[in-house]
Each structure stands twice: as C-alpha cells, then as structure tokens.
Image (cartoon, rainbow, N blue to C red):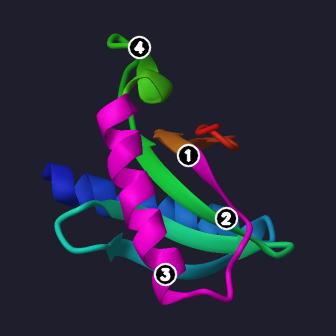
Amino acid sequence: MNSRETGNSAEDLVSSFLESTGYSILKRNYHFGRFGEIDIICSKNGIVVFAEVRYRSKDSFGGAVSSVNSKKIARMRKAAAGFVRENPQYGIFRFDLLSVDGQKISHIEDIVR
C-alpha cells in the first residue's frame, strides 16, 4: 500500500470512529486553494472540529503529536478560515488530532490554543 492509500485508509477508520462517537462528518480532504488542507471537518454539539489525521507505524520520531509543527498548524488555520468564510453558519470551532496506530485511534482535542 502506498502512502496515499495508507492515508485514505486511516481517514476512513477515523471517520467511522468519529461517527460512532456522535460526530457528523461535514467534509473530507477540504482544500482552501493552495493555502492548506484539512483531513476531516466534523461537528458535534454545535462545535465544528477541524481534524488532522496522522498514521504512525512507530513512535521513533516522537509520534503523531510531534509531527504537527507550527507550519502545519498555520496551514490548517488558513484552510479553517476559508471554510468558516464559506460557511458563516459555523461559529465555534477547534482543532483536534487523531492518530492511528494499527486499529487503535487516539483522539486529542483542542491541539491549537
């Protein structure tokens, strides 16, 4: 399986996980021009979540959390701003990280403050 197929598989797994925990998927692979991409946009209880999905086969380089650097966060913020501009009905949002290790999913809420 190549890296794109692995990424799609991880996003499928995370989408199913989010739906099973009460989230509604609004968009997947949302692009705002060349400014950035958000893997999954979902909502629950009136909060829109911009979710970054990371697949890790091992934690030798610090794991999923350390892989989200300031450059990635800046691109996520730009893409999120584009989504909010296009969808002004959504006002409350946060950024979450979901990491996939095999079939295990870890969900870290509100990674950007």
Number of other residues with Cα within 10 Å of mark 4, as a class: few under 14, some 14 to 19, many 20 or more: few
What are the residue bounds of the magenta stretch?
68-97
N-terminal of the pair, mark 3 or mark 1, is 3
Q: Are marks 4 and 1 in contact (CB under 8 Å)?
A: no
Residue at 79% across, 64% down:
21
Horizontal side of residue 102 vs 5, given as left or right: right
Query: What is the three-letter code of the residue carrying label 4?
Result: Gly
Residue at 47% across, 65% down:
80
Q: Are marks 1 and 2 in contact (CB under 8 Å)?
A: yes
Is label 3 or label 1 in front? 3
Number of other residues with Cα within 10 Å of mark 3, as a class: few under 14, some 14 to 19, many 20 or more: few
Residue annotated with mark 4? 62
Q: Does dot 3 land on a helix, a strand or a loop?
A: helix
Residue annotated with mark 3? 85
C-alpha separation, residue under disc 2 versus residue under disc 4 = 24 Å
Horizontal side of residue 3 vs 109, given as left or right: left
- 38, above or below 67, in the image: below
* Image location (x, y in percent) of residue 100: 49, 42
Is label 3 or label 4 in front? 3
Query: What is the three-letter code of the residue carrying label 1?
Result: Leu
Q: Does dot 2 land on a helix, a strand or a loop?
A: helix
Residue annotated with mark 2? 18
Number of other residues with Cα within 10 Å of mark 1, as a class: few under 14, some 14 to 19, many 20 or more: many
Q: Are marks 2 and 4 in contact (CB under 8 Å)?
A: no
N-terminal of the pair, mark 1 or mark 2, is 2
- 84, above or below 76, in the image: below
Residue at 13% across, 52% down:
2
Query: What is the three-letter code of the residue carrying label 2?
Result: Leu
* Total numbered labels: 4
Question: What is the quadrant of the C terminus in the image?
Answer: top right
Residue annotated with mark 1? 98
C-alpha separation, residue under disc 4 versus residue under disc 1 = 15 Å
